[in-house]
Amino acid sequence: MSATTPVGRFVAEFRENRVAVAALIVVLAVIALALLAPVLTPQDPYDLSTLSLRDARRPPGYVGTAGYMHLLGTDAQGRDLLSAILYGLRISLEMGLIAGAVAFLAGSALGVTAAYAGGRVEALIMRVIDLQLSFPAILLALVLAAILGQGRGPLIAALVAAQYAYFARTAHGAAAAERGKDYVEAALSTPLPGWRVAFRHILPNCLPPLIVVATVQVASAISLEATLSFLGVGLPPTEPSLGMLIANGFQYMMSGRYWISMFPGVALIILIVGINLVGDQIRDQLNPRLKR
């Protein structure tokens, strides 16, 4: 890829930050492991017929009744912890990416609409956004998850409701700065409908700050999902998300069975920190004021 193109210059500048490159490699490796979980893992943690309570809470390196070694030990249900972690990473990535994408679309559309419409419509939309941003995201997600119940659909809805306001605020600020520029005025003088001007001409120029927010919010959605599952209002116990795995082993920490909670916690931290480090580098490159 030529370094003279915008994408080439972006990649070249990204490669100069070794920490960001290492974080990106780690994130891609985690994604690959999660996608290949059915092939790499010795056990399907969703298949109850493969579980044995005789293998429950076994330490790392234990050879179970099925004949294979549990490298990271087993949890309280007898699940191979390595298998459960890789499948849990799939769930965490799925929840984070879907919730982040829906929140991105909904919040961006709302913010651009507010900036384009102006007047009372803008004031009403932004007052609602400001009101929501005054509450902690975890509190709002917790209340909605408790009301909607357990399951992937309700959980995604709770995560989107807790996060779309960040995209809306960012999109509104960027779109308001673009609204008075000459190319927008020129587009408004044509027979194009207003919605097309807003979403075809204004929105594409708002993408850089929205991309930065998206990287942060994907990591935040993964963290929120783990927190809600840990508190028992996220995914059901039959789906071993990382938060559920940490919760299952929390009560055994004092008895010395540290591995049940520690290994899923380490996997969660690696994923979130890796995404945040990549997002920080993208933010520094897309925001000229932050460039060194």
Image (cartoon, rainbow, N blue to C red):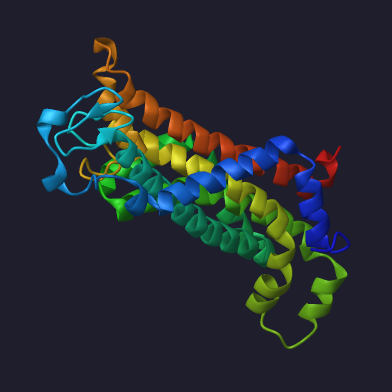
Q: Horizontal placement of 265 versus 249: left or right?
A: right
Residue positioned most to the bottom: 191
> Picture coordinates of residue 259 (x, y %)?
33, 23
> Picture coordinates of residue 241 (x, y %)?
32, 41
Q: Horizontal placement of 23 versus 48: left or right?
A: right
Q: Considering depth in this image, is 109 or 232 the residue closer to the camera?
A: 232
Q: Horizontal placement of 101 versus 146: left or right?
A: right
Q: Residue at x 35, y 39 (%)?
A: 85
User: Looking at the picture, does residue 244 appear above or below residue 118?
Assistant: above
Q: Considering depth in this image, is 216 or 167 the residue closer to the camera?
A: 216
User: Looking at the picture, does residue 189 appear above or below residue 185?
Assistant: below
Quarter of the figure with residue 175: bottom right
Residue 55 in view in this figure: yes
Residue 126 in view in this figure: no
User: Looking at the picture, does residue 250 appear above or below residue 79?
Assistant: above
User: Looking at the picture, does residue 291 appear above or below residue 3?
Assistant: above
Q: Residue at x 61, y 44 (%)?
A: 25
Q: Horizontal placement of 292 versus 62: left or right?
A: right
